[in-house]
């Protein structure tokens, strides 16, 4: 199998290493490709030797797309032209981190669900309404695999190669064993544990309760319903939360919703009243009062201060 690894300057060495290691274990031929070819800087005194995109010829079986913080080169000529062509040939593709934004700009992600870093979910949704942005480690929609980046690139490459196993000479288990890699995490693993989640030593029933809350932050469920879902009485659940978290279930649930809402407050210009309704608060006054109690200042003030932070 022949894999094209498209990359830009400042591609994280960790991500590139994960991809190259697993590709080698799968006995896959890899070609490193950049816009102009030559030595591409990754980090201080660290470079990758690449071919120019215009010099690539012959069949391509799959594409892996990596990027540094500035992914603009991926959507511009000459890389953009080649990427659009390869993807329209329905070649399997894995895009990692900021590279997902570049594919969105190329117009090849319309109608797809993609994984992006948690802080990019709102911005990508705002600029590309036809793309569904997820704050999971990875996502797979048809032949397009996406990954939020970092160490998750190791998981993503294993799952990506597993998805095209018919074109490989090695099984997914052989790939993992050859790289001394652990089994990949599930595809839709959240990037972060549940907001304000309890420690690992907490009872399993508490973890389940927090997971139930995490799954219904925008449309809050009644506490008795959550207690029933995890097999406890409401009284037992209250004792559990007070013992291990120092708060009632309702207080903890509200803090989780407010923490999620704070991203909208500081990262968007959405009216506060709309944010309140989006996160299950009956009105903006109630939302602002609860927000100030948790974070020390009202949402309007928090938004102003967030805009003043240096870039």
Image (cartoon, rainbow, N blue to C red):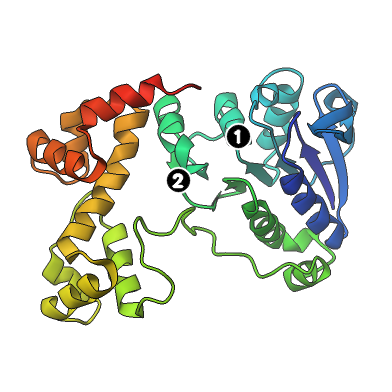
| Mark 2 burial class by Cα count in 10 Å: few <14, some 14-19, many 20+ | many
Taking 284 as reference, is 28 above or below it? below
Residue bearing the label numbered 1: 98
The image quadrant of residue 125 is: top left
Q: Earlier in the sequence, mark 2 or mark 1?
A: 1
Answer with left or right where residue 106 lies relative to residue 128. right
User: Residue 165 at what x, y percent from top left?
Assistant: 74, 63
User: Residue 68 at what x, y percent from top left?
Assistant: 68, 32
The total number of labels drawn is 2
User: Could you tell me which residue is drawn at 52 percent across and 42 percent down?
Assistant: 117
User: Residue 286 at what x, y percent from top left?
Assistant: 9, 40
| Mark 1 burial class by Cα count in 10 Å: few <14, some 14-19, many 20+ | many
Taking 183 as reference, is 81 above or below it? above
Circle 2: element type: strand
Q: CA distance from mark 2 to mark 1?
A: 14 Å
Instruction: Look at the image and tell me whether residue 157 can be seen.
Output: yes
Q: Which mark is residue 156?
A: none
Residue bearing the label numbered 2: 134
User: Could you tell me which residue is drawn at 60 percent across and 25 percent down?
Assistant: 106
Circle 1: element type: loop
Answer with left or right where residue 60 lies relative to residue 129. right
Question: Is 186 in front, or is 165?
Answer: 186
Taking 87 as reference, is 203 above or below it? below
Instruction: Look at the image and tell me whether residue 269 can be seen.
Output: no
Answer with left or right where residue 59 lies relative to residue 186. right
User: Could you tell me which residue is drawn at 85 percent across and 38 percent down?
Assistant: 32
Find the residue positioned furthest to the top: 77
User: Could you tell me which residue is drawn at 58 percent across and 64 percent down?
Assistant: 185
| Label 2 with label 1: CB-CB less than 8 Å | no
User: Residue 87 at what x, y percent from top left?
Assistant: 67, 36
């Amino acid at each position: 199998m022949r894999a094209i690894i498209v990359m830009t300057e400042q591609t994280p060495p960790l991500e590139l290493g994960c991809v190259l290691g697993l590709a080698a274990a799968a006995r896959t031929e890899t070609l490193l490709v950049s816009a102009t070819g030559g030595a591409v800087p990754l980090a201080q005194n660290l470079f990758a030797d690449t071919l120019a995109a215009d010099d690539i010829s012959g069949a391509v079986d799959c594409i892996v797309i990596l990027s540094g913080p500035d992914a603009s080169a991926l959507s511009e000529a000459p890389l953009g032209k080649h990427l659009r062509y390869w993807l329209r040939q329905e070649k399997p593709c894995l895009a990692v981190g900021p590279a997902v934004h570049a594919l969105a700009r190329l117009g090849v992600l319309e109608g797809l669900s993609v994984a992006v870093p948690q802080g990019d979910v709102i911005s990508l949704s705002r600029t590309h309404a036809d793309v569904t942005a997820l704050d999971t480690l990875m996502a797979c929609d048809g032949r397009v695999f996406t990954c939020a980046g970092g160490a998750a690139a190791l998981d993503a490459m294993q799952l990506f190669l597993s998805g095209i196993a018919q074109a490989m000479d090695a099984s997914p288990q052989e790939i993992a064993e050859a790289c001394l890699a652990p089994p990949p995490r599930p595809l839709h693993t959240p990037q972060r544990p549940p907001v304000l989640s309890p420690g690992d030593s907490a009872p399993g029933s508490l973890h389940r309760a927090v997971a139930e809350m995490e799954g219904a932050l925008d449309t809050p469920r009644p506490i008795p319903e959550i207690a029933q879902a995890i097999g406890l009485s409401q009284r037992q659940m209250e004792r559990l939360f007070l013992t291990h978290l120092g708060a009632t279930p309702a207080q903890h649930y509200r803090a989780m919703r407010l923490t999620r809402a704070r991203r909208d407050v500081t990262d968007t210009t959405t009216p506060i009243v709309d944010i309140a309704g989006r996160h299950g608060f009956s009105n903006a006054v109630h939302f602002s009062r609860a927000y100030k109690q948790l974070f020390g200042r009202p949402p309007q003030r928090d938004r102003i201060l967030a805009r003043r932070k240096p870039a």
